[in-house]
Structures are given as structure tokens and as C-alpha cells.
Amino acid sequence: MNAPANYLPILIQAAVALGFVVFVLIVTHILGPYKKTKNKQDNFECGIEAKGNARIPFSVKYFMTAILFVLFDVEIIFFYPYAVNFKEMGQAGFFAVLMFVGFFMIGFLYVLKKGAFEWDD
């Protein structure tokens, strides 16, 4: 059932995809323009003119909000397998999800107590 010949279509598809990427990279370097002007070398950020130094400090709360969003968003993904298989998991699965939600809530309360959601400076 798991003969090496069964993987041949996957290897062909991977080789075609890799070949296409290499081909496009080579062709763009050959056909692309070589003029380098100051305007082309400037950074482009959503149409906003670049001003000053890029090394200005940001508030730590900005990064905390971004990290917490990713953390809580990824944890929600773990609810999907339980929602699909909750009948087969039975009581053991239910208690595992309760434990997961408990850890989730403890982390949320810790972050709330530390003031990560308060933006008043």
C-alpha cells in the first residue's frame, strides 16, 4: 500500500513548483531593469513618506497586545478537534477540555492582574 511509486506524483509536483520558482527568479534578474535611483531605493510603507529614524521605540503594551492576541487566537484552534469529536472523547475528553479551559482562564486572569489590558499611561 505504501510503495515508493505512490509518492511519485507528489515528488513531480514538488519538482515542478521548485523549478517554476527558480525559473521566475532567474528570468526576473535577466529581464529586470538595472537603473538604481534614490527614489527606487527608498522604503515604501503604505504610501506614507518615510520620516526620521526607523529605530523609534514603541510602547511595550503594543507588543504585549500583539503577543496576547496570537496566544489566545492559537489556543482557540485547539477547541476545534474537541468540537468535532466530543462524542467519541466521552467524559475523559470533557475533563481534558475543562482542564485546558482552566489553564486558559488562569493565564487570562494573570495577564489581567498584571495590567496588560490597561492602556492609560
Image (cartoon, rainbow, N blue to C red):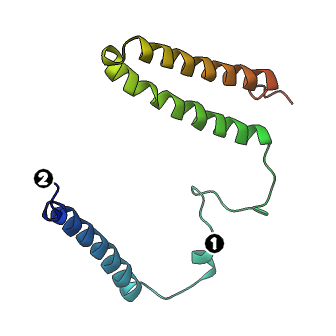
Front in this rendered view, residue 28 or 33 = 28
Label 2 vs label 1, nearer the camera: 2
The quadrant in which the C terminus is found is: top right
Q: Is residue 42 left or right of residue 8?
A: right
Residue 105 position by quadrant: top right
- Apparent side of residue 96 relative to residue 66 in the rendered image (left or right): left
Q: Is residue 101 above or below residue 24?
A: above
Amino acid tagged 1: Asp
* Kind of residue at disc 2: Met
- Towards the viewer: 15 or 81: 81
Position in image of residue 5 (x %, y %):
13, 65
Q: How many marks?
A: 2
Instruction: Give the spatial CA distance, label 2 vs label 1.
Output: 56 Å
Query: Quadrant of the rendered structure where residue 24 is?
Result: bottom left
Percent from the top left, x then y, of residue 64?
72, 38
Left or right: 92, with 75 as reference point: left
Q: What residue is at 61 percent from the left and 17 percent from the top?
A: 102
> Which of the numbered marks, if any, corresponds to residue 20?
none
The residue under label 2 is 1
Question: Where is mark 1, residue-wise?
Answer: 42
Task: Identify the element where label 1 is drawn.
Answer: loop
Image position of 58 with respect to 64: above or below? below
- Residue shown at 41% from the left, 11% from the top: 91
Residue at point 60%, 35% (across, down): 71
